Image: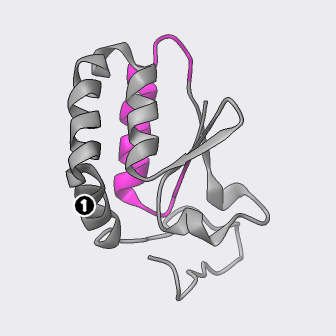
Amino acid sequence: MIVYYDSYCKICTNSSTIWKRLDWRNKLTFDSFRNMKDYPLEMEKSLHVKYNNRWYKGYSAIIQIAKMLPLLWVLVPFMYIFKFIGLGNIIYKLVSNNRRLVPVNQCADGDSCQINPHSR
């Protein structure tokens, strides 16, 4: 499973760090979509996961990650309930829409950091 996160987002990088620590079975690979030459702009809006040639985004991506991490398995049934009633997506969008993007230490030497004005 490949987890594409936003390295300009502190919430995203912190979440990725926690998931890496919980991934003792080495099922997850992490990459900032900012490292991709031409990434879909949709990746600026939500977490994306690619697993078994399928794409998951937002709250569905978090569920897929939790399914790979044994310590989070106990939460998965509740996550599906939250998804079914719509609360999971609401909470995810609330957090996603209010995150801050700061490209600290993300720019090549001598380059200025640019954030797309349409990024959120």
Which residue is more in the foreground, 40 or 31? 40
Q: What are the residue bounds of the magenta stretch?
A: 4-27
Give the quadrant of the C terminus. Answer: bottom left
Q: Position of residue 97 (x, y in %)?
A: 33, 72
In this view, 23 is above or below 104: above
Give residue 91's position: percent from left, percent from top: 22, 57
Quarter of the figure that contains the N terminus: top right
Query: Residue most toward the right?
Result: 37
Q: Residues within 10 Å of mark 1 (few under 14, many from 20)?
A: some
Residue placed at 52% from the left, 56% from the top?
Answer: 7
Where does residue 109 sit, x and y in percent of width and height? 70, 68
Relative height, residue 102 to residue 117 (above, below) = above
**46 sits to left or right of 80:** right
Q: Residue at x 51, y 79 (%)?
A: 119
In terms of image quadrants, where is residue 69? top left
> Closest to the observer: 26 or 96?
96
Three-letter residue code for mark 1: Ile
